[in-house]
């Protein structure tokens, strides 16, 4: 069988097929049933186990490059925390992320307000915004959150906010929910904060980083782990929601099948070439 | 003293930071906290320096009329405009309807997302052209990749729904992630930790000096 | 389908299409978008670090230390002990030192005096070398070694098999990275076993990377279809 034409195929045809297979299911969803894996169940359970009115630190360490994988779990986790009447302090350690994080949190808060929930900025949640410094900021917060963040995302003095009067350092938090796209992120929080200050934490990370964090999950340094859009979709399913991650799973499924086919066909072409006598 | 003083600074501060992990006494913890505050401020200046460097490099490229120099005019103009607008808008520059936030949401955010989205196409092309199974090890890699790729998405379980539950792609993928993958990743983590500790100590003790750059 | 009436969404959508045009071939629209992006990013990073770090963490405390007034509200602030009477979290005039170091960083732009920037770099390198060494030691070495000490029997058969396999995988993978002796004989067999586990982990990593990249594309298409074209 002569498969030379496949080997010489212009890669732009492959781009076109990827584009069609990704866009098609978004236009006409099929609704392939979603499961839920144990790490995701553990993530949700860790938040469920929080006593009501706990104060939670939510560090959203991502920028617009990771939006499709990071924004859905941010929304879902924030909703779950607000429904448990937890108070949330949000930070961002990625340059370029604070605007997106603030917009995500605020739009989710507005959705909750539209449903009749009493969610007030400054009392129920505070966005401290961005701070440069990577691990130095994490350890600096250990001596006082307001020392590292003297003002919030909206240029209010941190100490003047009602929620921050109950927040001193990491001992004020019951849990760290880390939404992380890379460095600085989950690994650094585990190394600097979980190890030094023993703050329990859960992580929602990009799929690229997720395999690296399974050892932390197994050791108990992470109480739960969401990996990528698939993890975010499973989390939405567990919460009974149907957000952007769930809507994207059909497209994810079909494009994965195509990539798998590419790997197989690429090798079939190679093997048939070797079998042809010279 | 141009090289010796920085080495001494690194050694003293590095040793202090190491000590601060073990000694909670304020004679160590307060200076350590101060040094972390210093690092935060200096890193922020570093970002400003990066922007300034981008400006100088591109201005010099425009002056020398290097290829694509008209695009560099666009780069410099937008850089200067963004900085000017951001500084003019003051402390509330990140409020909802500012020009800075328009630039952030519609220009920066959308284009950064799209730049990363391009990778999806190239990964398909690379999977077809470059992923070659020539050895047993590469075959193992390919097999694991295929199982994980298909098992992690809903279609994997649907494709293997006719198999008993523990043999479906989702369950096999789960086992791969929790056992063999986990073991190897832990080994890599521990090995890398030893490497970082060794490098950290070499830097603190002044054996590793590459961060000083060349020259006297 | 109902097209968006938001000017900002149209700007974002057009720039998105300019960037996607690179897939056909490199072209002026893509180059324009690319340079626009770099210019806006660099400018944004400067402004962000200025207003979120330089002003609140350096300028405001220095103004309070030397003038006794808050720079925003102009209220009088308690300054007992003077500008250099700092305490944890309130370093007052001691912040002149990092301010000076930050300014010295800019000497990198002038070759004749760039050696002064080494002092600033030395402080950063010292702090991060110290933090990373202890962080990796505690978080990645000690905690991981502790978690590896799991019982190999005493549970059901499947859990025991997995525990043994895990331990074998961990030890053989670690031995693969032991380069002080040539991988021959027993060490060679163990190292080759470690390669099996490492290849499985790299394959799993590749699978997850593919998932991540495709998610990013799905996100952009969701924006184009839902936010721009209104096809929900």
Image (cartoon, coloured by chain):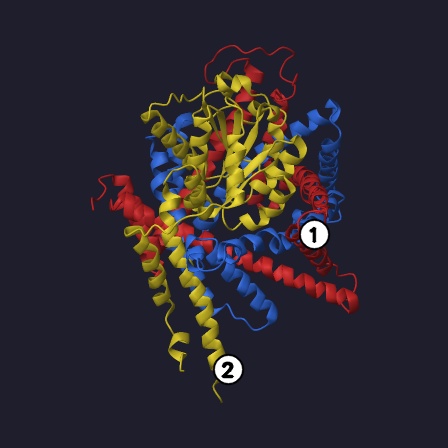
Give x and y (percent) for residue A127: 46, 28
Q: Is residue A75 above or below residue C114?
A: above
Chain C rendering hue = red
Chain letter for the blue part:
B
**Circle 1 sits in a helix, a strand or a loop, which is it?**
helix
Residue A100 image-quadrant placement:
top left
Chain letter of the residue beneath label 2 in the structure image: A
- Compared to residue A236, the image places residue A129 above or below, namely above
**Residue that label 1 marks:** B191
Q: Residue at x 44, y 27 (%)?
A: A82
Image quadrant where residue C133 sits:
top right
The residue most toward the left is: C2
Subunit that carries the residue with mark 1: B
The residue pinned by badge 2 equals A274
The kind of secondary structure element at disc 2 is helix
Label 1 Cα crowd, 10 Å radius (few <14 / some 14-19 / many 20+): some
**Which chain can be seen in yellow?**
A
């Amino acid at each position: 069988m002569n498969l030379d034409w496949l080997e010489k195929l212009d890669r732009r045809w492959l781009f076109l097929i990827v584009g069609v297979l990704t866009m098609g299911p978004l236009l006409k969803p099929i609704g392939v049933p979603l499961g839920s894996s144990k790490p995701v169940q553990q993530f949700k359970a860790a938040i469920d186990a929080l006593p009501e009115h706990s104060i939670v630190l939510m560090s959203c360490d991502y920028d617009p490059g990771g939006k499709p994988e990071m924004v859905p779990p941010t929304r879902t986790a924030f909703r779950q925390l607000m429904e448990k009447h937890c108070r949330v302090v949000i930070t961002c350690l990625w340059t370029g992320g604070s605007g997106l994080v603030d917009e995500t949190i605020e739009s989710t808060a507005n959705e909750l307000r539209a449903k009749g929930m009493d969610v007030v900025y400054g009392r129920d949640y505070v966005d401290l915004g961005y701070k440069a410094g990577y691990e130095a900021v994490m350890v600096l917060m250990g001596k006082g959150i307001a020392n590292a963040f003297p003002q919030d995302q909206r240029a209010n003095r941190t100490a003047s906010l009602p929620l921050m009067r109950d927040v001193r350092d990491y001992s004020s938090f019951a849990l760290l929910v880390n939404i992380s796209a890379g460095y600085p992120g989950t690994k650094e929080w585990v190394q600097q904060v979980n190890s030094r200050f023993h703050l329990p934490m859960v992580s929602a990370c990009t799929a690229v980083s997720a395999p690296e964090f399974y050892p932390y999950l197994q050791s108990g340094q992470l109480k739960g782990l969401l990996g990528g859009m698939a993890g975010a979709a499973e989390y939405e399913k567990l919460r009974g929601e149907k957000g952007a991650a769930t809507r994207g799973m059909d497209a994810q499924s079909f494009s994965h099948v195509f990539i798998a086919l590419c790997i197989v066909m690429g090798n079939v072409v190679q093997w048939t070439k070797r079998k042809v006598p010279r | 003293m141009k090289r010796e003083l920085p080495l001494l600074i690194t050694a003293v501060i590095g040793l202090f930071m190491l000590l601060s992990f073990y000694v909670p006494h304020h004679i160590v913890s307060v200076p350590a906290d101060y040094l972390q505050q210093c690092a935060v401020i200096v890193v922020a200046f570093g970002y400003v320096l990066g922007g300034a460097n981008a400006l100088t490099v591109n201005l010099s490229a425009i002056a020398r009329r290097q290829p694509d120099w008209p695009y560099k005019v666009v780069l410099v103009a937008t850089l200067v405009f963004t900085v000017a607008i951001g500084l003019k808008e003051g402390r509330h520059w990140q409020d909802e309807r500012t020009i800075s936030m328009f630039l952030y949401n519609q220009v920066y955010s959308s284009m950064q997302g799209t730049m990363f989205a391009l990778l999806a196409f190239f990964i398909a092309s690379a999977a077809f052209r470059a992923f070659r199974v020539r050895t047993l090890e590469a075959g193992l890699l390919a097999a694991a990749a295929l199982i994980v790729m298909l098992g992690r998405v809903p279609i994997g379980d649907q494709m293997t729904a006719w198999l008993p539950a523990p043999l479906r792609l989702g369950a096999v993928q789960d086992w791969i992630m929790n056992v063999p993958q986990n073991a190897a990743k832990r080994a890599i983590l521990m090995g890398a930790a030893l490497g970082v500790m060794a490098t950290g100590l070499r830097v603190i003790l002044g054996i590793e000096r590459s961060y000083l750059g060349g020259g006297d | 389908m109902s097209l968006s009436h938001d000017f900002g969404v149209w700007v974002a959508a057009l720039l998105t299409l300019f960037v996607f045009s690179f897939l056909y071939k490199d072209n002026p629209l893509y180059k324009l978008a690319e340079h626009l992006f770099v210019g806006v990013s660099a400018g944004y990073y400067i402004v962000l670090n200025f207003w979120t770090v330089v002003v609140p963490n350096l300028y405001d405390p220095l103004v309070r230390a030397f003038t006794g007034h808050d720079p925003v509200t102009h209220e009088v602030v308690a300054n007992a002990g003077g500008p250099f009477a700092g305490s944890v979290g309130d370093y007052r005039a001691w912040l002149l030192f990092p301010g000076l170091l930050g300014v010295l960083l800019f000497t990198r732009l002038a070759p004749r005096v760039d050696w002064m920037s080494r002092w600033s770099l030395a402080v950063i390198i010292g702090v991060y070398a110290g933090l990373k060494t202890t962080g990796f030691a505690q978080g990645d070495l000690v905690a991981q070694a502790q978690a590896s000490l799991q019982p190999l029997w005493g549970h059901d058969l499947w859990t025991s098999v997995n525990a043994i396999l895990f331990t074998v995988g961990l030890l053989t993978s670690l031995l693969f990275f032991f380069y002080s002796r040539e991988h021959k004989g027993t060490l060679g067999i163990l190292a080759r076993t470690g390669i099996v586990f490492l290849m499985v982990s790299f394959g799993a990593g590749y699978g997850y990377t593919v998932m991540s990249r495709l998610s990013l594309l799905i996100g952009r298409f969701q924006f184009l279809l839902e936010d721009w074209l209104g096809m929900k």
